[in-house]
Structure formats: C-alpha cells, structure tokens
Amino acid sequence: MSERFSRYFAETVVLISVEWERERNLMTAAWVIPLSSNPPLVGVAISPLRYTHQFLERSREFGLNILSTEQVELSQYAGTTSGREEDKFSKGIFAVEPPQKIRAPLIAGCFATMECKLADSFTTGDHTLFVGEVLEIKVNKGKSPLLLHEGGYYRLGELLGRYHS
Ligand SMILES: Cc1cc2nc3c(=O)[nH]c(=O)nc-3n(C[C@H](O)[C@H](O)[C@H](O)COP(=O)(O)O)c2cc1C
C-alpha cells in the first residue's frame, strides 16, 4: 500500500508552536484530532524527524494555532522549512501573541489558538501522538479555518445541515 491514505481526509491545518530554554520554533501540522471533552484533550501526530519533536519532549507544552484561510503562505513556509536550518520567527512573518498559561508563543491572525499542556504521548508507527490538555482557547469569529484535502488548501463550503446529538 504505497498510496498516501491521509490525502482523502479533510484536515484542519495548524501551527504547533513551542519554546524551550528561550528558543522558539513552530511547524505546520494537519494530523490533529480532538480526543476527549472532559478533560479537553487534543492529539497531534509529529514525526520524530521534526525539530519541534525535541521541543515537545522537553517543554511538555505547546500552542496549537488553527490557521485561517488568509494564512496559506505561513502554512507552506512553516511546513517546508526546519527550525534546525533557520529561525522561522526571524523572518518577521509570524506575529506573536502572549500566552496565558504556557511559555510557547501564540500566532496572531489565526482562526483559533489553544494553549496545551502535554498529558501523554504514544509512538504510532513513524509518528508520535502527543496528547495535550487544552488549558486556554481564543477564537477569532471573524476568520475561517484553513482546510487541506488531496494536497490542496481549501476554505469551508456550503452548510448542508446541522448535527444533532
Ligand atoms: C500542510 C502540511 C501539513 C503537515 N502536517 C504534518 C503533521 O501532521 N505531522 C508532521 O510530523 N509533519 C507535518 N508536516 C511537515 C512539517 O511541518 C515539516 O517537516 C516542518 O518543516 C518541520 O519543521 P521543524 O523541523 O522546524 O519542526 C506538514 C507540512 C505541511 C506543509
């Protein structure tokens, strides 16, 4: 099975922001999933090859910044450049906002930002599933979340109905 199965999901695109010993980094992630309501838990699958992986293991916290439709370029840049090679914050393209409960910076202009404390982590094949407890949320109602599907970036389309539980 060589085909990339994940292409067929409609994924939310986020920036995972981290800080450790005054050094900051961030990377794009689309393998993100809510896992629990109470406590509020979110999972993000990060390859051990990412520089961000090392930060997460050490700092045990992260910012989860749900990108807005205006931030496609930020997704591409943070997702194709490693913090090992250049300081992604030095370009001046990421405006930061101060966090309340963690040290990692939050990214301005996003649809939503969440401050997460690491609750658990598991090896899942060639990735690590980092499970974060969401401590703070800010939502920017004027923005729309950025989606990824079959290698393309999209905005939300037509409302087809309402979910009833
Ligand atoms: C749209 C998009 C989604 C991505 N999703 C993930 C992901 O969920 N997990 C992962 O480990 N890498 C993902 N990546 C790749 C990392 O963002 C990329 O390797 C990045 O350069 C790592 O940066 P770092 O080495 O500074 O941590 C994605 C890249 C893009 C462009």
Image (cartoon, rainbow, N blue to C red):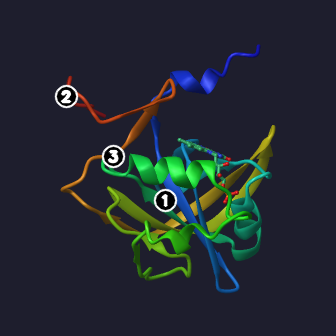
Give the mark nearest the N terminus, 3 or 1. Answer: 1
- Name the residue nearer the viewer: 63 or 23: 23
How far apart are the alpha carbons under marks 1 and 2?
Answer: 26 Å
Specify whether residue 28 is in view. Answer: no
- Report if the beta carbon of the residue with label 2 is closer than 8 angstroms to ligand 1: no
Q: In the image, is residue 134 above or below residue 67?
A: below
Q: Which residue is mark 1?
A: 40
Numbered disc total: 3
Q: In this image, 113 relative to 1: left or right?
A: left
Amino acid type at image mark 3: Pro
Circle 2 residues within 10 Å: few <14, some 14–19, many ≥20: few
Task: Please give the label number shown on residue 159.
Answer: 2
- Name the residue nearer the viewer: 92 or 102: 92
Density class for disc 1 (Cα within 10 Å; few <14, some 14-19, many ≥20) is few
**Farthest top residue in view:** 1
Q: Which is nearer the N-term, disc 3 or disc 2?
A: 3
In this rendering, would 2 be left or right of 135? right
Q: Which residue lies under the disc numbered 3?
A: 145
Q: Find residue 56 and report its horizontal and vertical position in percent.
A: 70, 66
User: Which residue is drawn at the image coordinates 62% and 69% (left, top)?
Assistant: 25
The answer to whether mark 3 and mark 2 are in CB contact below 8 A is no
Nearest-to-viewer mark from 3 and 1: 3
